[in-house]
Image (tube, rainbow, N blue to C red):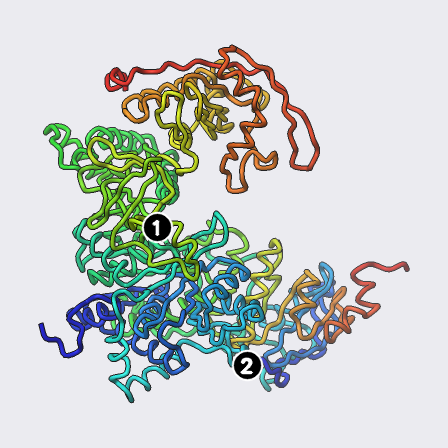
Amino acid sequence: MSDPRGQAELNTFPRLLMQHAQQRPNRPAMREKEYGIWQTYSWAEVAQNVRAIACGLAELGFKRGDRLGIIGDNRPRLYWSVAACQCLGGIPVMMYQDAVAEEMAYVLQDAEIKFAVVEDQEQVDKMLEIREQCPLLEHVIYDDSRGMRHYADTFLLGLDELQSMGTAHDKNQPDFLDGEIRKGQPDDVSVMLYTSGTTGKPKGVCQTHDAFIQSAKGGCQFDKLTENEDILSYLPMAWVGDHLFSYAQAMVSGFTINCPESGETVMTDLREIGPTYYFAPPRVFENLLTTVLIRMEDASWIKRKVFSFAMDVAKRCGAEILDGKSVSTSDRFQYWLANLLVIGPLKNVLGFSRIRVAYTAGAAIGPDLFRFYRSIGINLKQLYGQTETCAYVCLQPDGQIKLDSVGKPAPGVEVKLAESGEILVKGPMLLKSYYKRPDATAESINEDGYFLTGDAGFFDEDGHLKIIDRAKDVGKLNNGSIFAPNYIENKLKFFQHVKEAVAFGNGRDYVTAFINIDLEAVGNYVERRGLAYSGYTDLAAQPMVLQLVKECVEEINAQLAADPMMADSQIKRFLILHKELDADDGELTRTRKVRRKFVSERYEVLIDALYSGKKEQHIETDVKYEDGRQGKVSADLKIEEAKTFAPQAAKTAA
Amino acid sequence: MAREIGDVILKMEGISLSFGGVKALTNISFDVREHEIRSIIGPNGAGKSSMLNVINGVYHPQEGQVTFRGEVRREMEPYLAAKQGIARTFQNIALFKGMSVIDNIMTGRNLKMKCNVFQHALHWGKARAEEIEHRRKVEEVIDFLEIQNIRKTPVGRLPYGLQKRVELGRALAAEPSMMLLDEPMAGMNVEEKQDMCRFILDVNDQFGTTIVLIEHDMGVVMDISDRVVVLDYGKKIGDGEPDVVKNDPDVIAAYLGTSH
């Protein structure tokens, strides 16, 4: 194919952009709400603006390979800056907009950033604050000029001025930018995304054009995304998911990115846009559902009746209808009615009327929550991936949704399991390297070219990948079967009555667990049954509560038994702790994760009791109160046996 | 640059106001310069709100004269004040509780609307174009005050601090050259006060609006004012820059009490 501009191969983002500007110049590429009205930018306009920004940057002295810091909410002009930077062969580095100045200083230094495009005065102030620490930083360009009139510093420049500089430059030397775009190669680094750095300092993950384009193509093909999709881009630009879903996939398939007006208006914007393609972490779905349920509780009894009818019908057959399974005519009719009366209007209120594909990831999603959205006809699916793999490893195929799996390996991705159960992946989406960290790169990619995810998992009989835990937490029971404490604990925590759980079993004969009840939920439960209690310790020791928790544990056991890999991990014995695990006592981290080692040392007598067949155990624990005083809590804890299921019998019991 | 303090635009001379036997204000004179932030402070019942009401013509003083932009009057009239670009907010919020934020702010544009009630009722042609234009102005105010997320919420459902902000918005929508703010921060927590201060300073800075402010929070007053007038029992007991006023023995006595 002959192409005068040498863009026949659409293997870099700038080439893709210019191609869209030619092929679909008038289709909306981006929308942004300004002064209460949605403004649309067509692909041609976007390309024009990107050219202007790119030329402006070049005029300022931005060179091939330079890094461009980008900080702010999801604004069209910041996305354009990403593309502009790529046109010049630069590497955009997005940063989390709510990070404090100090954290930004680290990234600015680490990535040796000379140019930064920031959203507004707030971010400019941060840049000025850390200027001393980042001597390399030469230019800070701001998008929103509000409040910037008194900043006379030559270090600062408005994006408007940069763009007009660039427009003039582009007019004088129209071949300059096309030449730069032609120089771009698919294996150039297209973007640098920083890992969250929960373990050690954040690392810059270098991804190539090819990696993101392949991942985006794979995803679009997998979900049959077209240029007609609308997506609401509201998750941080610095997060790999936003870069894949909003930037890369839109560039590949030419669909429309919608930027919310502000962080607080996302719900309204969602409703006005009615996206066809949507991503949210489980927490967002949970908040939405809670809002709906609370409003239903305040509704009149007729409305409540109709709502509960619709929800019953949806629970019975909604997900099956969505998956295209066979459903009886009467159920179909009832679902049609429920949809007419409740489900349709409900989806409209939530802004989900047009959704074709929705994804969730980032944390485990509760089964009830997941089922709810699927039952009202929202094609909610899960995926698996990390920054190092362009958030593209596994996807759930339409119609084959399993609650606790993350689906099948995505097109072009090879997934295999190491001896230890660790998930290894290979494919075009792998990182090129960690920036300036050859040691870390070598550590995370093995000699066969597989990336070590650090997660442990296994494939079920249908080839779906299940993630069970971080690989380093996974142990083995004495009979050799796998023990994944997080997997079991997460299952327990999905019950509203269970707040926290700690499972034991590594190097033991069977699995046991400590359980923390949720004071509010359980308190409510016993109050409705006319039982009085004096506090957490008292409540935790009530026979009624023990029975309640026992039912939860047994339900988990039934689920575990259904899974051949996990059948041995059923919880044989458990106890309810006499105090809540607390970060002040060092039992939890500040982000509320259980500190396994500390807990097992502190409560050694309890663990011994769990494995010794005792029926009761006395315990005395030091506690720290919020005002710093020390105290003691003591109790006699009952140890309960839970019913376990034989692996084969499980299917009928569950 | 907007924030350069200009000439005197408002001059109050020998204002005395009484309600029957109650003397609210006695022979008070002070002036306000263009683009400045001028505060009126004083203990409860000192006559601060009465003073604002005299400025925009709600109260008619028995003695004295008001000079606004060179026009000398015995007394101001509310419609004249509004016409000449004086907007105000109230101590006890005076918004339309059942109307949305947008509609409330829109009422601030009323004076600028040219079409009559029938044209607006039909919402056609000129009236429509006019509404679009005004709506745009209102949206600019909403953007300025960062209240996009509540633009369609009925005002009655908003927390107090936000209602105050909406009221400021309505005053701003009239594009005033002078704003009278009656205790804009009363009853607010520290964070809300900080926000409000920032907005007042931004208004003053960006639009060059002259601001006459009544406020009880001394910290705020001393921080943001260019000049301060102190009233006590209807009399002026101090006038000048914050630092001067702060150390004036009469002012200290009025605020802290003194042994007689």
Is A10 drawn above or below residue A296 in the view shown?
Answer: below
Measuring 20% from the left and 34% from the top, which residue is drawn there? A318
Label 1: few (<14), some (14–19) or many (≥20) C-alpha neighbours in 10 Å: some
Horizontal side of B166 relative to B13 (left or right) equals left
Observer-nearest of A199 and B218: A199
Residue B85, can we see it? no
Which residue extends farthest bottom?
A172
Number of labelled discs?
Answer: 2
* SS under mark 2: loop
Horizontal side of B220 relative to A80 (left or right) equals right
Residue B252 quadrant: bottom right
Q: Which mark is residue A445?
A: 1
Q: Nearer the viewer, mark 2 or mark 1?
A: 1
- Residue kind at label 2, given as amino acid type: Ala
Callouts 2 and 1 close, C-beta under 8 Å: no
Which residue extends farthest front?
A447
Q: Which mark is residue B6?
A: none
Observer-nearest of A466 and A519: A466
Label 1 lies in what chain? Answer: A
The quadrant of the picture occupied by the C terminus of chain A is top left
Label 2: few (<14), some (14–19) or many (≥20) C-alpha neighbours in 10 Å: few
Q: Position of residue A585 (x, y in %)?
A: 61, 34
Label 2 lies in what chain? Answer: B
Measuring 54% from the left and 42% from the top, which residue is drawn there? A590
Horizontal side of A262 relative to A586 (left or right) equals left
- Residue kind at label 1, given as amino acid type: Ile
Residue A631 quadrant: top right
Q: Position of residue A404 (x, y in %)?
A: 30, 34
Q: Position of residue A598 (x, y in %)?
A: 56, 32
Horizontal side of B233 relative to A250 (left or right) equals right
Q: Which residue is mark 2?
A: B2
Q: Position of residue B2 (x, y in %)?
A: 55, 81
